[in-house]
C-alpha cells in the first residue's frame, strides 16, 4: 500500500498583492489635494512685524470676524472681497446676533494708511467697540525697519 502524497504547499503564493493598498493611497492623496485649498480661509497678507505683539487667540477661531486689507487697498470680509462703503453694513449684519464681539483687522504692512483707517472707521460706525489689529512677531535678527 502506497501513501498518497499531496503537494498543496507548492500552490500557495507568498507574494503580497499591493494593488488595493495603492488604490487606497491614491484615493487619500486625491482627497487631501481637494481639501487642502479649502483649509486656507485667510487672504494672503504680509502683516506688520512688531517686537512685542499682544496675543489674540480669539482671532483664530472659526467664528471670528476678520477684515483683511491688502497692499493694493482691496478689503476682504473673511474671504469675500467687498467695497469699503459696504463694510459697515456687512459687519452690522454679522454682529446682529453677537453684540460686543471684537472685529480683527489684518492689514498688509505696506497697505496705505488711508485704506486701513477707512476700514476701521467703517467697522466702528457699524457699532463695534473692540477692534483688534493683528500683527506678527518680529523674527530674531530682523531689523526694525523691516526688509
Image: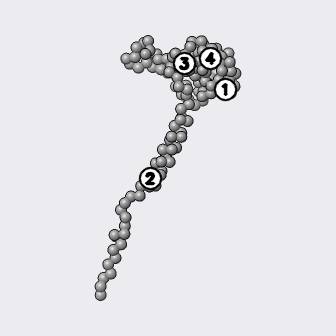
Q: Nearer the viewer, mark 3 or mark 4?
A: 3
**Callout 1 crowding tier (Cα within 10 Å): few <14, some 14–19, many ≥20:** few
Q: Earlier in the sequence, mark 2 or mark 4?
A: 2
Instruction: Classify residue 16 as left or right of residue 42.
Output: left
Query: Is label 1 in a helix, a strand or a loop?
Result: helix
Q: Residue at x 51, y 44 (%)?
A: 30
| Coloring applied to the structure | one colour
The residue at 34%/76% (across/down) is 6
Q: Residue at x 56, y 20 (%)?
A: 70
Point out which mark residue 71 bears: 3
Q: Is residue 104 visible?
A: no
Residue 137, position in %: x, y?
A: 45, 19
The one nearer the camera, 9 or 74, is 74
Front: mark 1 or 2: 2
- The CA span between labels 1 and 3 is 25 Å
Mark toward the viewer: 1 or 4? 4
Q: Quadrant of residue 15?
A: bottom left
Label 4: state its secondary structure. Answer: helix
Nearer-N-terminus badge (2/3): 2
Q: Label 2, label 3: how many angstroms apart (C-alpha)?
A: 47 Å
Q: Residue furthest left?
A: 2
Gap in angstroms between the C-alphas marked 1 and 4: 16 Å
Q: Position of residue 89 (x, y in %)?
A: 70, 21
Task: Residue 117: give x, y in percent of width and height.
Answer: 60, 13
Vertical side of 25 occupied by 83: above or below: above
Is label 2 in a helix, a strand or a loop? Answer: helix
The residue under label 1 is: 94
Q: What secondary structure is found at the residue carrying circle 3?
A: loop
Amino acid at each position: 500500500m502506497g501513501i498518497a502524497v499531496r503537494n498543496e504547499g507548492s500552490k500557495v503564493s507568498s507574494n503580497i498583492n499591493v494593488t488595493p493598498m495603492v488604490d487606497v493611497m491614491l484615493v487619500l492623496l486625491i482627497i487631501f489635494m481637494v481639501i487642502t485649498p479649502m483649509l486656507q480661509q485667510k487672504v494672503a497678507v504680509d502683516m506688520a512685524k512688531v517686537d512685542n505683539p499682544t496675543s489674540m487667540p480669539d482671532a483664530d477661531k472659526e467664528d471670528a470676524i476678520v477684515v483683511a486689507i491688502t497692499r493694493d487697498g482691496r478689503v476682504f470680509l473673511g474671504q469675500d472681497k467687498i467695497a469699503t462703503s459696504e463694510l459697515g453694513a456687512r459687519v452690522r449684519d454679522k454682529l446682529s446676533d453677537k453684540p460686543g464681539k471684537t472685529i480683527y483687522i489684518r492689514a498688509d504692512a505696506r497697505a496705505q494708511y488711508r485704506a486701513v483707517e477707512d476700514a476701521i472707521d467703517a467697522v466702528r460706525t457699524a457699532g463695534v467697540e473692540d477692534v483688534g489689529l493683528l500683527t506678527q512677531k518680529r523674527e530674531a535678527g530682523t531689523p526694525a525697519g523691516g526688509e
